[in-house]
Image (spheres, helix red, strand yellow):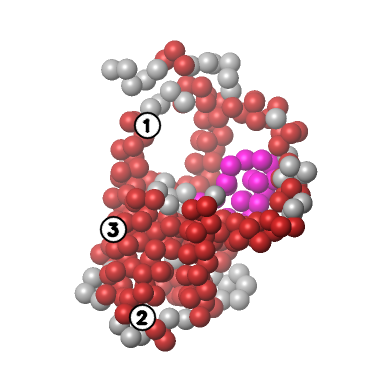
Amino acid sequence: MGVVDLSAVDLSDNSLSQSINELGTTFGAAFGQEGMQSLFSDSGRIPQVIMTIIAFSLADIFDTIGTFIGTGRRTGIFSKEDENALDDSKGMNTKMDRALFADAIATSVGAIFGTSNTTTFVESAAGIGVGGRTGLTSVTVAVMFALSSLFSPLIAIVPAQATAPALVLVGVMMLSSFKDIDWTRLEDAVPAFFASIFMALCYSISYGIAAGFIFYSIVKVVKGKAREVSLILWVIDLLFILNFVILAFL
C-alpha cells in the first residue's frame, strides 16, 4: 500500500512530444559555446579537461566491453578467439570489433541529438535469458521503447519495487560465468573477486573491470611475475588510478 502514487500522473506530460519540441535546442548543443567550446576556453584547465575526457572514455569503453563479453558468453556469439582478437586485431575483423564500432556510432549520434548516453546495457541479459540470440531481439526492444515513450506518464508510475526483481534475475544470469573462473589460481581468483565486488558496490561495470586490472597487476608483482604484465596493462592501470583520483576531486 502506498507504493504507487497515482496523484503524480499527468497524462498531458509526454516525454516524446517534449523531446521533439526541444530538439531545436538540444541538437548540436554539444558543439556550441556552452558545450565543447567552453572546455578549451581556459588554457589553464586544458590538462584537467583532457584527463577527464580520458577518464570518461575509459569508463565507457570498459563498461561496454564488460557488457559485451558478459552477455555474449550467455548467447555464445563471442568465442574465445573473438575475445583474444580484441587485443591484436586490426580493423573490423571480429564480431567484437563490429559491435564496439556500432556502440561508438550510437554514442556519438546520441550525443549530437542531446540524449543520454546511448550505449549497451547489461539488462540485455533479460532478453537473452528468454531465448534472444539475434539482432531481432534488439529491434523488438527498440520498437517497444518507441511505443512506451507514447505512454511515458503511465509507465512512470511503475515503482522501483516492481522493476528490482527483474534486475536481480539479470544478476543471477550474469553470475553464471563465475563457474568458468579457476578459483584455485590466484592470478584469476583475486582479480575476479574484486571485480565482482566493485561492480556491486560501485554500481559500475567499468569500475569493477578497473579493480580487476589493478589487482591482477598487484598479484603478479607480489608473486614475482611482474614481467608477465604487459606495458599496455600498466598504462591502463595508471589511467584508471588517475581516473579515480580525478573523480575524488571533482
Residue 176 at what x, y percent from top left? 28, 58
Q: Label 2 belongs to which residue?
A: 221
Q: Residues within 10 Å of mark 2 (few under 14, many from 20)?
A: some
The amino acid type found where label 2 is placed reads: Val
Frontmost of labels 2 and 1 is 2
Question: Which is nearer the N-term, disc 3 or disc 1?
Answer: 1
At a point 56% along the width and 66% down the height, the residue shown is 97
**Residue at the front extreme, as displayed:** 44
Residue at 43% in and 23% down:
157
Give the residue type that dot 3 points to: Ser
From the image, tell me which residue sits under label 3: 176
Residue 109 part of the magenta-drawn span = yes
Q: Which labelled disc corresponds to residue 160?
A: 1
At horizontal 65% and vertical 46% (from top left) the residue drawn is 111
Which image quadrant is residue 112 in? top right
Q: From which residue to which does the magenta span run?
A: 103-120
- Mark 2 element type: helix
Depth check: give the residue in front, 214 or 249.
249
- Residue type of the residue flagged with mark 1: Ala
Residue, far left: 184
Residue 163: in magenta span: no
Question: Mark 1 falls on what kind of element?
Answer: helix
Disc 1: CA contacts within 10 A as few (<14), some (14-19) or many (>=20):
few
Regarding residue 219, the answer to whether it shows in the image is yes
Q: Is residue 130 visible?
A: no
Q: CA distance from mark 2 to mark 3?
A: 30 Å
